[in-house]
Amino acid sequence: MTNKSLLEKFKVIVYFFTAKVRSKLLFHAIRNLYKNYPTNQIIFLLTRIYDPNAIRRKIRSSIRSIKLEFVTNSGERLFLELNDHIDWTTFIHGSFDDTYFNLMKELSAKTEKIWKFIDVGANFGSISIPIGNKWEVLAFEPQPELFNRLKAHSKVNNCTKIMLENLALASEKVVNDTNGSIHLYRPPGNSGATSHIFNWNPSMAGPEIITVNVTTLDNAMQNKAKFWEESNILIKIDVEGGELEVLQGGFNFIRRSRPIIILEHRSDLLKTGGGEELLAFAQSLPDYCTKSLLRSEKNGKIDLEDWDSARRKFELALVPNEKLAYFTF
């Protein structure tokens, strides 16, 4: 047996252990270590081997669920389930992703205008809930269990400015071909990797199949004129391989409202030409430019840089030409 085979067997044993040996006391200890020693490689490794996203790629066994109430760095109350990657990351770091909150804050200050946020693929609200305490939010989440958690988080944090839709978004063709109901495939350990593509981001164990309602962004916005009229809009689209279909189904709304759009572009997973098709459609939007986000590690400021598909970038920014100047922070 080779050293590589022995190492892989050892990793399986370690991940089986971290899938089963889980407790609130242990997790709070790990989090405190990470807060105090964030650059320590051993502590970083500890946070990783307990991350359900890493566990799911190594073993088929289920991950013991630990539920707890948690207060984020910005003061939101969340009910976390630490057998899932999104929850684990939120717990360890104190938030999942501050990019959109910071961008809303900077855009509002820069323009002195009203901004609103559309979250396509909201999960349990790790991004939408902090924003919903300050700005109007329209959040789409198709998975029933996550949508119920999103509602609970909206209520407990008194987010009166947030509208919730238990819907998936896609193109008109997808909606028509499926009669408004599609299958999603949710891998154990990472609800954020749920996709309409069966083998999108696979785990060792097979995915759970969820049937959800689907519509287009154009249809969803038809009765929400008060939301988008006389406002600037930032849209986040993170739907694990379905970003192109969301854009196609929202073409009229995008053309009319001219939102800034940040979408996930996983060139490492879009292996069958979908990445090029997505970029081609994005670049065909009238008077839009294609950029990527540039975040300063020192002060959290966000700017734009030219998109280079050869580099490993996840966030593709579609910005109307007339709003490019908003990014000179």
Image: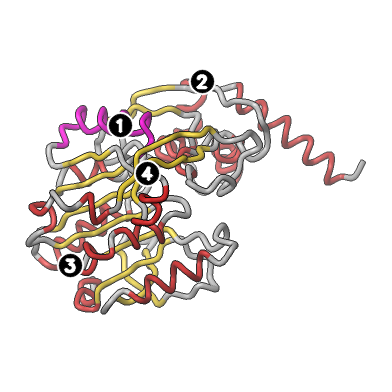
Question: Looking at the picture, which amino acid does disc 1 mark?
Answer: Val
> Which of the two residues, 211 or 112, is positioned nearer the viewer here?
211
Residue hosting label 2 = 23
* SS state under label 4: loop
Going from the N terminus, do you reach mark 1 or mark 2 first? 2
Between label 3 and label 1, give the one nearer the viewer.
3
Between label 4 and label 3, give the one nearer the viewer.
4
Question: Looking at the picture, which amino acid does disc 3 mark?
Answer: Arg
Please name the predominant secondary structure of the magenta segment in the image.
helix
Residue hosting label 4 = 179
Task: Kindly identify the residue that appears in the image at 48 percent across and 65 percent down.
Answer: 313
Mark 4 crowd level (few <14, some 14–19, many ≥20, 10 Å Cα): few
* Residue 6 part of the magenta segment: no
Q: In this rendering, is residue 137 above or below 71? A: below
Tag 2 and tag 3, C-beta contact below 8 Å: no
The disc label shown at residue 71, or none = 1
On the rendered structure, is 207 left or right of 78? right
Residue hosting label 3 = 256
On the rendered structure, is 20 left or right of 87? right
Whether residue 189 is visible? yes
User: Is the N terminus in the top left, top right, bottom left or bottom right quadrant?
Assistant: top right
